[in-house]
């Protein structure tokens, strides 16, 4: 009997002890739950925090991390990146934690990841991570004023090929120079715009004809058959008459050319020089002359191809921008324009842009990409 009473007593004591432990556990659990909830964690997140033994750390530091909570609730939590989850402010898109884990797995530092997440969209980053497999230091691209997220893979490939600095790589790729000339070109949507860019990547429609073509005064043109836009006419005649006051002389020998005229001209040069014709003659649709905003000039004493040897050229070189003109194909820019130097070819852009290009030694291709296209 005594033995039975002893067994019963021990059983009761065990039950009481167990109940005390349960009560203490639930009191602690409730207290922890309450404190974590006060930090703004959700019930689901709290349960996962406690399951992963993260409650003491979070309560001690009094940190709320939506990034950590999302990693837990999406079953993407990796213990080795606990402090990183806490470090990074949450980005509200579906693949954020997946991207964060991948970037950490590939060895990106937290400051690099911050830059990546600041400048790239979910789609951009998703594409980059799919296209690449290892760590690539592309973050310096992202801080450039001329960075375009859609070109990131092209930047990486172009720099790897030519070993250029980041800024030059961006400028070259933005101008499509990572593609061969006359490939990946676009048909120009607004050919009537006075700032239209026509080059080996931007083609005019074959049926495009400027609406306001007119002839120049005889003092500034070799004949009345040469046509230009009214905007160009006014400024060129002003420049032409001003230079005559200095006993110098410039005249237009070529202005607007139709698509068909340019095709005939290019075919003639191609029959003579083959693909070398591309160095000095535009293919039909790719010629600025079709816009009516470009002219070829000479001084009536020498052929236009010798214009650089004249005092008129020196004056035009230093003053044309004041009338809104640029020398469109300058020396040492052949890799950008795709044409040999043409001192006689002027393009009208207006005084402000022409002056900027003159002062900064830029081609219109560079300016357009940096300031208009972007």
Image (tube, grey):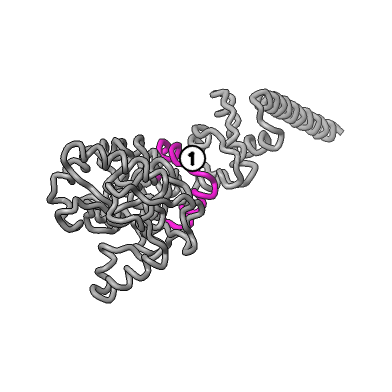
102 left or right of 183 in image: right
Q: Is residue 239 visible?
A: yes
Q: Is residue 234 magenta?
A: no
Crowd around label 1: few <14 · some 14–19 · many ≥20 (10 Å): some
Q: Tag 1, which secondary structure?
A: helix
Pick whichever, 188 or 13, lies toward us.
Answer: 188
Residue at 60 percent across and 34 percent down: it is 66
Residue labelled with disc 1: 117
Q: Quadrant of residue 109?
A: top left
Q: Which residues are magenta?
A: 108-134
Image position of 212 (left or right of 247): right
Residue 111 is one of the magenta-drawn residues = yes
Q: Position of residue 357 (x, y in %)?
A: 30, 40
> Which quadrant does the N terminus fall into?
top right
Magenta: main secondary structure:
helix
Where in the figure is residue 89, as x and y percent of width and height?
A: 53, 33
| Above/below status of 3 relative to 102 | above
Give percent across and percent down for residue 305: 19, 58
Of the 4 image quadrants, the one containing the C terminus is: top left
Residue 135 seen in render? no
Is 151 or 283 nearer to us in this picture? Answer: 283
Q: Is residue 39 left or right of residue 4?
A: left
């Amino acid at each position: 009997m005594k033995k039975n009473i002893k067994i019963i007593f021990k059983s009761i004591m065990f039950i009481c002890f167990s109940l005390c432990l349960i009560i203490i556990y639930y009191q602690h659990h409730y207290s922890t739950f309450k404190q974590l909830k006060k930090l703004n964690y959700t019930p689901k997140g709290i349960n996962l925090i406690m399951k992963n033994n993260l409650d003491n750390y979070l309560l001690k530091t009094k940190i709320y991390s939506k990034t950590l909570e999302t990693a837990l609730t999406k079953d993407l939590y990796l213990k080795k990146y606990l402090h990183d989850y806490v470090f990074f402010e949450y980005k509200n898109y579906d693949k954020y934690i997946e991207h964060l884990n991948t970037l950490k797995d590939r060895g990106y530092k937290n400051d690099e990841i911050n830059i990546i997440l600041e400048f790239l969209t979910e789609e951009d980053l998703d594409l980059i991570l799919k296209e690449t497999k290892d760590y690539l230091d592309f973050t310096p691209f992202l801080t450039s004023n001329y960075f375009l997220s859609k070109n990131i893979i092209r930047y990486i490939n172009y720099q790897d090929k030519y070993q250029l600095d980041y800024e030059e790589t961006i400028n070259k790729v933005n101008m499509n120079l990572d593609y061969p000339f006359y490939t990946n070109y676009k048909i120009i949507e607004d050919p009537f715009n006075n700032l239209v860019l026509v080059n080996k990547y931007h083609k005019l429609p074959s049926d495009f004809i400027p609406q306001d073509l007119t002839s120049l005064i005889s003092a500034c043109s070799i004949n009345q058959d040469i046509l230009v836009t009214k905007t160009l006419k006014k400024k060129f005649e002003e420049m032409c008459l001003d230079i005559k006051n200095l006993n110098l002389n410039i005249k237009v020998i070529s202005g607007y050319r139709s698509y068909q005229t340019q095709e005939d001209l290019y075919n003639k040069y191609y029959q003579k020089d083959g693909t070398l014709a591309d160095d000095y003659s535009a293919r039909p649709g790719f010629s600025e002359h079709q816009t009516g905003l470009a002219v070829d000039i000479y001084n009536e004493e020498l052929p236009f191809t010798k214009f650089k040897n004249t005092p008129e050229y020196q004056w035009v070189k230093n003053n044309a921008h004041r009338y809104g003109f640029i020398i469109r194909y300058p020396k040492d820019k052949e890799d950008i324009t795709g044409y040999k130097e043409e001192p006689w070819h002027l393009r009208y852009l207006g005084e402000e842009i022409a002056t900027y290009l003159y002062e900064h030694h830029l081609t219109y291709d560079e300016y357009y990409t940096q300031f208009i296209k972007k």
